[in-house]
């Protein structure tokens, strides 16, 4: 750890515009293990989400609202993890922990925009499942192509508007002292700790934005699942109930991982924010959830499994 600190001091002296991402340097004995684990998770994320996009577009039977939204989620997760993980792997592999000011602001804006978009998109996907389970006879009438496109557009637009607002507030604040960021990527709570002036007004404005983008979607999503579970309980078949509960349970697990860790990070005051706990909480919504999404949303789905088998058979036949 002492060697890392010396190296960080040398790096900082090279450019006053650079930030230093300390990452997991407080736990040097974990860095090699984290590098291997995060690399494996990242590769699984790339393979799983790319497979969903490719297979969903290849097979006409998957041209449904559910897979339309799932493709958006997969593309979103690909972009989200790629905006963070490569820099993290570089930091874990060696001693070069610098990131330029422009690169740090870009990472902050992009990761915040994509994370906010995912928060809204998960609600849209829950609404789609609500319509399918609770209004099966009217599903095709409700989830028309124009509505699907509108809901997806609202998700992306809302995410980027939130990022513009919060990044703009952050950029307007002067930063003091050495630009050490005790995190593995450029994230808002850590930036606030570098502010020269009192951040109470800025935090109050950000808190409102975060409630809108995190707490409100999480609440709507939970309400939709209450209705879904009520509809499932009305299913006469015990096997049908079991499968429905398994699917809902796996979806809710991802939801709790994503929203729970994000709410923990973003809704607590800066003075009580623990960077040590924050770094490990951030691993859930930046790395673990994007890796789990393809498994949760596809492996329990017969249509997707059948499509994947066809792709594998085609490859074997061509091989």
Image: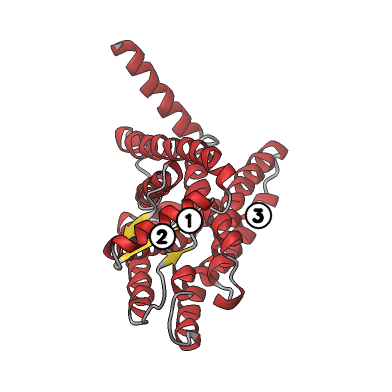
Q: Earlier in the sequence, mark 1 or mark 3?
A: 1
125 with respect to 133 (left or right): left
Disc 1 residue crowd, few under 14, some 14–19, many 20+, Cα 10 Å: some
Q: Nearer the viewer, residue 177 or 206?
A: 177
Which residue is label 3 attached to? 229
Disc 1 versus disc 3: nearer the observer: 1
- Tell me which residue sits at (41%, 70%) in the image: 178
- Tell me which residue sits at (68%, 43%) in the image: 241
User: What is the x, y in percent for residue 165?
Assistant: 35, 77
Alpha carbon distance from label 2 to label 1: 6 Å
Task: Give the answer, above or below, for where 288 lies relative to 59.
Answer: below
Task: Give the answer, above or below, for where 225 lies relative to 303.
Answer: below
SS label for mark 1: helix
User: What is the x, y in percent for residue 174?
Assistant: 36, 81
Which residue is label 2 attached to? 9
SS label for mark 3: helix
Task: Give the answer, above or below, for where 37 lies relative to 224.
Answer: above
SS label for mark 2: helix
User: What is the x, y in percent for residue 304?
Assistant: 45, 33
């Amino acid at each position: 750890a002492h060697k890392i600190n010396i190296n960080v001091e040398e790096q900082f002296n090279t450019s006053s515009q650079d930030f230093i991402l300390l990452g997991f340097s407080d736990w040097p004995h974990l860095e090699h293990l984290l590098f291997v684990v995060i690399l494996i998770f990242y590769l699984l994320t790339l393979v799983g989400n790319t497979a969903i996009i490719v297979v969903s577009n290849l097979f006409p039977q998957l041209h449904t609202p559910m897979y339309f939204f799932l493709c958006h989620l997969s593309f979103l997760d690909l972009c989200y993890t790629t905006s963070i993980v490569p820099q993290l792997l570089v930091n874990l592999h060696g001693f070069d922990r610098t990131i330029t000011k422009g690169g740090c602001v870009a990472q902050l804006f992009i990761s915040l925009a994509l994370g906010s978009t995912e928060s809204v998109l998960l609600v849209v996907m829950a609404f789609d499942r609500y319509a399918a389970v609770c209004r099966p006879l009217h599903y095709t009438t409700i989830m028309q192509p124009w509505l699907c496109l509108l809901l997806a557009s609202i998700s992306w637009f809302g995410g980027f508007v939130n990022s513009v607002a919060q990044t703009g507030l952050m950029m307007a604040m002067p930063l003091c002292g050495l630009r050490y960021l005790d995190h593995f990527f450029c994230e808002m709570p850590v930036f606030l700790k570098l502010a020269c002036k009192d951040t109470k007004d800025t935090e109050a404005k950000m808190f409102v934005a975060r409630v809108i983008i995190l707490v409100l979607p999480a609440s709507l999503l939970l309400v939709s699942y209450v209705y879904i579970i009520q509809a499932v309980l009305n299913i006469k078949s015990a096997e049908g109930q079991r499968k429905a509960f398994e699917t809902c349970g796996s979806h809710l697990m991802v939801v709790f991982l994503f929203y729970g860790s994000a709410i923990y990070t973003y809704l607590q005051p800066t003075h009580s924010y623990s960077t040590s706990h924050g770094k490990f909480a951030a691993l859930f919504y930046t790395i673990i959830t994007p890796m789990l999404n393809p498994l949760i949303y596809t492996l329990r789905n017969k249509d997707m499994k059948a499509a994947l088998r066809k792709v594998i058979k085609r490859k074997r036949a061509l091989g």
